[in-house]
């Protein structure tokens, strides 16, 4: 009678760990310590082994033309090939002197048949003391069982690493999200399909680099630690450099250093960089995230619109095999031409309000009040501030299909070049999908006088809010004084793109190790991680 070995026969994890620790100590007392093994000669991975056997089996059947003796001889020939596989024991069934294990490596699972007749009584008795979760090596041959499952027939088994903690029983994807994020290693062991998201993330990164490299962009690295806090709106993390005895700031963007390189003579540069912002957390925000920023001399924001639209289309096709993806039940047509609207046009389309009807800032503020639109700047709000508030209130949640919104008010675009035809606006765009901002781009401001004035206004606003540490980046202004050519720049968050292409609802699903509150300080009355 088949018996299932239950990984949770002992409910108390502490007791279960002690039992496994006792087994380990007994092994050591007998002269064997699995943790001293340094390698194992794996000859084939599980997925590859399964494919190879199917191909060899097909060749045997095709050449035998139905002759049973030839078929058997061919299959016996395959069994003569000695192989070595390794992996973690995920399940264990015993039938008297024969045991069936499922082991998993990074490619797939594989059934393993182990019997006392093959191992000998002493080795088999030692093997029976192993546990689900242990990592083992198997020397043997591949065959197909009577039930039709490709399996490995073990001639020798080796314990490569002892698991001291039991795997959860009947994991089924680990429904406890908090545990999944905190113990990603356990999530990956017991919920292997999670790995597919991160494999796809790696593919997306390769495609981004390949696309930009093929356009002649040069990938560079710029500092993570910066000596000053700039006046931008994002709040940085602060650390201290002991040798220099000075506070330093983790970067909130890579923009200014990349544009310094354009000044220095690079025409096309990009960086895949880790960014840190000391701000709120929600399903689309994590304090540290990965961005791609790119800058190209002698183009403008229209050129960057064309670049990003074609880049997304190419990446999606190469990674997903289609340029239309389903995200949270909604089809997103990345391959179709993206709608392009100015911010004025978008507000008029979705809010029914026309910026051009406002003759003064006072009229704009009165319009906002009439439409119950809250404007953060209050009585000092300009027409530009009000337009932005209308956009956030009426437009963003309507932008499900890929949409480019361009020509932003100068009030919230301190690094973008003003439009020559209307200096109240800048040559800036953001693009949206599934009502979520995915990236940001400018015709870069290269007037050092205008840039310094905008920096100074930013710093003054920060200091008015009580932040006395922020400063004007004088060195960047100096760089502009040497001359920045007309330049287009664009940045986007990799994590949000991965969320889109893997149909992941939360940014934490696409980060292997998302930021979490320490367990010891968790407030049991309210989970602020969600």
Image: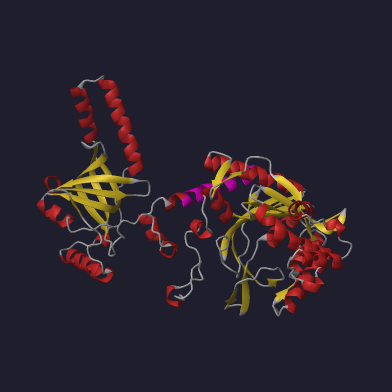
Q: Nearer the viewer, residue 253 or 411?
A: 411
| Any part of residue 268 in sight | yes
Check the image and name the residue furthest to the left: 121
Residue 235 percent coordinates (x, y): 64, 71
Q: Give residue 269's position: percent from left, percent from top.
A: 67, 52
Image location of residue 104, percent across then percent down: 32, 50
Magenta part mainly helix, strand or loop? helix
Q: Residue at x 17, y 50 (%)?
A: 94
In the rendered image, the vertical position of residue 215 relative to residue 70, given as above or below: below
Is 395 on the left-hand or right-hand side of 330?
Answer: right
Q: Is residue 216 visible?
A: no
Query: How many dots with numbers?
Result: 0
> In the image, what residue occupies the spot 74% across and 63% down?
389
Q: Is residue 205 left or right of residue 348?
A: left
What residue is rendered at 67% in x and 45% in y?
309
Q: Residue furthest front?
A: 370
Q: Which residues are magenta?
A: 197-216
Is 203 colored magenta in this rendering?
yes
Residue 337 in the figure: left or right of residue 29? right
Instruction: Indicate the position of residue 506 as horizontal and vertical percent values.
Output: 52, 58
Q: Is residue 471 magenta?
A: no
Which of the pair 130/398 is nearer the observer? 398
Give the colour scheme shown. Answer: secondary structure
């Amino acid at each position: 009678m088949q018996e299932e070995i239950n990984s949770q026969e002992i409910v108390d994890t502490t007791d279960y760990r002690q039992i496994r620790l006792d087994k380990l100590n007994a092994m050591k007392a007998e002269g064997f310590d699995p943790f001293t093994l340094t390698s194992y000669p794996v000859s084939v991975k599980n997925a590859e082994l399964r494919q190879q056997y199917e191909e060899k089996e097909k060749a045997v059947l095709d050449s035998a033309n139905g002759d049973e003796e030839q078929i058997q001889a061919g299959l016996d020939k395959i069994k003569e090939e000695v192989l070595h596989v390794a992996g973690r024991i995920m399940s264990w069934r015993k039938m008297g002197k024969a045991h069936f294990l499922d082991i998993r490596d990074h490619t797939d699972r594989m059934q393993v048949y182990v019997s006392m007749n093959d191992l000998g009584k002493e080795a088999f008795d030692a093997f029976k003391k192993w546990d689900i979760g242990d990592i083992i090596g198997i020397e043997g041959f591949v065959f197909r069982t009577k039930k039709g499952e490709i399996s490995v027939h073990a001639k020798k088994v080796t314990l490569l690493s002892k698991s001291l903690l039991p795997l959860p029983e009947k994991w089924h994807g680990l429904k406890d999200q908090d545990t999944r994020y905190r113990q990603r290693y356990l999530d990956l062991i017991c919920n292997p399909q999670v790995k597919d998201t991160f494999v796809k993330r790696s593919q997306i990164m390769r495609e981004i680099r390949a696309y930009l490299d093929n356009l002649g962009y040069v990938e560079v690295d710029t500092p993570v630690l910066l000596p000053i806090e700039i006046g931008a709106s994002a709040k940085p993390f602060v650390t201290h450099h002991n040798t220099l005895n000075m506070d330093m700031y983790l970067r909130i963007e890579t923009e200014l250093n990349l544009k310094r390189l354009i000044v220095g003579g690079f025409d096309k540069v990009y960086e895949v960089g880790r960014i840190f912002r000391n701000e709120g957390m929600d399903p689309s925000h994590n304090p540290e995230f990965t961005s791609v920023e790119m800058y190209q001399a002698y183009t403008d924001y229209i050129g960057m619109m064309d670049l990003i639209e074609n880049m997304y289309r190419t990446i999606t096709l190469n990674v997903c095999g289609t340029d239309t993806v389903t995200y949270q039940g909604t089809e997103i047509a990345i391959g179709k031409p993206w709608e392009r609207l100015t911010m004025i046009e978008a507000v008029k389309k979705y809010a029914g309000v026309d910026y051009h009807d406002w003759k003064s800032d006072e009229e704009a503020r009165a319009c906002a009040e009439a439409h119950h639109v809250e404007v953060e700047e209050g009585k000092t709000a300009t027409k530009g501030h009000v337009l932005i508030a209308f956009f956030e209130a009426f437009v963003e949640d309507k932008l499900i299909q890929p949409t480019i919104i361009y020509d932003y008010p100068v009030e919230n675009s301190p690094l973008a070049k003003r439009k020559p035809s209307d200096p109240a606006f800048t040559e800036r765009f953001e693009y949206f999908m599934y009502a979520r901002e995915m990236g940001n781009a400018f015709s870069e401001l290269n007037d050092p006088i205008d840039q310094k004035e905008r920096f100074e206004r930013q710093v003054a606003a920060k200091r008015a809010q009580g932040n006395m540490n922020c400063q004007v980046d004088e060195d960047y202004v100096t760089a502009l004084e040497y001359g920045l050519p007309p330049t287009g720049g664009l940045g986007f968050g990799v994590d949000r793109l991965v969320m889109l292409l893997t149909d992941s609802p939360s940014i934490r699903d696409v980060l292997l190790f998302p930021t979490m509150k320490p367990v010891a300080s968790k407030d049991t009355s309210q989970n602020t991680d969600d």
